[in-house]
Image (cartoon, helix red, strand yellow):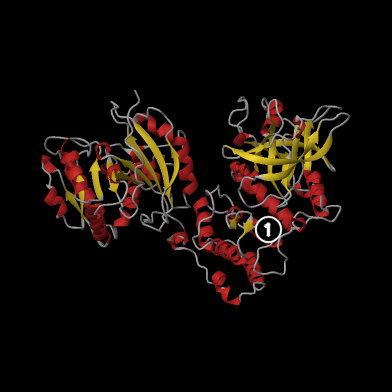
Amino acid sequence: MSEGNDRLYELARAATVHLLPARGAGTPLWGSGFFVAPGWVLTAAHVLRPHLAQDTGTVFRVRGDGVDAEARLEQWLLTDARRTPVPLEEDLALVRLAGEPEEQHHECVWLGDRAVRHSGVLKVCGYYPGPPETHFRIVDAEINGHEDRHGLIIKPDIDFPSGVSGGPLLDPETGAVVGLIKSRRKQQDGGKAVAISALRRFGRTYRTVMAAHDRWHGGEPQSPAGDNWIDLQGGPPAGGGEQWTPADRREALRLLAELPPPPDAPTVELLAKKARSHNQWPGGTPALLTWRDGAGLLYEGARPLEALTFLRYLRYVELYTSSRGGDATALGHWIGVRLRREPRRAMHDFVRDAHLPEALHPAPGGGPGRIVIPYPGPGEGGTVAVLLDPVIGARPARFFWQIWYDDGHGEPELHEADGSRHGHDPAALVQAMRGPLGALLRAKDQEGRPVPLEVALPGEYFDTAVHRWRFDDIAELNDAGHLGARRQVVLRALERRGDPDKLWSERWQAMAAQQGFSGWRTAAQGDFPGVNGYRGAAFDRIPVMCRPAGRGPGRTAMRLALQSGHGVALWHVDGHSSGACPASCDTLYARAEELLGTLGSLAELPDLIRHVRQEVSELRADRAWAEPVALLYDDPRRPLPSEEGGTLDAPL
């Protein structure tokens, strides 16, 4: 055991505590925990649950090296305090000490900026119940497996009693705490732990805690022995300007903690990608709640990329913050100072010449307002797609679902797929997808720019009113609630998945070059253009139907339009399927014509429809015509994922 490791373990011991009742001599400890910021203790939720389930405001005690203070639960991740055992991803709790943080003097562990799950050797730290008295121990362990999204499996060659639950797992290699103990294995050695990346599930509280963590470590706190976590992490020498050192990281994270937090995860993700010159990081993209989380994407394995990449990311954050009226002067000054240590002078422009991507420029007028946002083409932004496959032979119709995300810079990624055996009827689809789809939409929404939603269905189901879906049972009074009023919602033809055909691609290219559009009244009075009529239609004409697209003449008309390469159309999902058109149809066509006449480009149509739907929700009487209108916007440049395997048959 090296001297450096001994000193690191002393810091871990100083930051580890145990939790116990507020009063009573000789009372047994509940479990362990550790300081992650001044006044903030992280522990396992199951340690507190037996004592706080009836009253989460119960006062208890935190005791450790030089600390003996009252504390309360600030937040835990439990969704049901009666559920046993506690799921891995919910077994975290944050505790606040009584009193002001600046009055509290104690050690805090170091938490890295990477959201990864550790493998290999580490140290388990925690308090043991004795006898004769509670005492601290640190023992060797090894992670040899993972479970679910945040679980770590401890190799079965160590036995530890229950008191260590909630204690930290220290990685001697990186000098960071990478998880906390959850439980022993039943009837065998070893156990389970929760990766520290699960801390991000605290949302806004995570932002608060990590800002306090980075400010505390950024002040170079000293233990009584004169040590601090950064100096004991090793890494390249501070004089080597090409490499990103632990000291660089500490100062950068301290400066980022002083800035207003990012508005959303896509902003952080986009700036990290720009810093990496659009070279994707290994693995999936974790939750991105802070600017420090973006810095955690600038690694290859445990090795940080070169200093220029980090400085370029910091420059983007500086530009973004300044463009929104924030003060990033201190960050900008440090970037300049650090850049002067970089010996490759010719490369300095890689940082200095960085500029915000167009998607992150502030909206005109200082806010999003009713500015029309063009629908993203390839390389212009992300989209979320829901693919609804009808179960063959099911009557009435049932669907299996898949949720995909396309960032615009490569192949779409499958986010989650239906795990049911029989699919879902249309009325149950929203409930079935509410969790995974709602979470993905919230994760990818940018400030003032909600991510577009594409729903792909076979043409005969185009009258599914997806723009009326809502995921929130309870909404604010000024919240429209329905998807179509919140974001761009478009339909796509499921039968077109995979490589686009020539007719479709050529018509789309020609329409995208147009700057003015008009409505084309199809399927009027039961009559509709033939194949030649659709193929020969002018590129500035968009089919509009007062009939549903899934039955009667409207279904025939939509089938011919798709076969003839049309990628854009409007129709009335509740319209009449046969007979003469009532007077309301004339209103629909006139209003649609008026709307299409305001387009400056084809890409403006989905957001223009969203504005109209929002005005419908605001009870604008002149917009009521648009409430039942659906939009086909099927861009062949961003094809749906190809179908894998055969058709989905109804189980016997």
**Residue with the most extreme front position:** 157
Quarter of the image where one finds residue 650: top left
Q: What element carries label 1?
A: helix
Q: Residue 370's image quarter?
A: bottom left
Q: Where is residue 118 in the image (x, y as percent from the top left)?
A: 65, 45
Q: Which residue is drawn at 30% across and 27% down?
A: 394
Q: Looking at the rendering, in which quadrant would you find the C terminus? A: top left
Crowding at mark 1 (Cα within 10 Å: few <14, some 14-19, many 20+): many
Instruction: Return the x and y of residue 98 as percentages of the image width and height.
Output: 76, 40
* Residue type, label 1: Arg
Identify which residue is drawn at 36% across, 41% down.
644
Observer able to see residue 41: no
In the figure, 286 relative to 63: above or below? below
Give above or below for 523 relative to 370: above
Please name the residue that numbered disc 1 is placed on.
254
Query: Which residue appears at 67% of the width and 26% of the height?
Result: 53
Is 84 on the left or on the right of 618, as rendered?
A: right
Toward the bottom, the furthest residue is: 346
Residue nearest the observer in this picture, 144 or 454? 144
Q: Is residue 544 at all visible to an observer of this figure? A: yes
Relative side of 642 to 40, left or right: left
Q: Classify residue 131 by image quadrant.
A: top right
Report the residue at 52% width, 68% height from top: 354
Residue 417, horizontal then vertical, whole percent = 43, 37
Q: Where is residue 208 in the image (x, y as percent from the top left)?
A: 65, 48
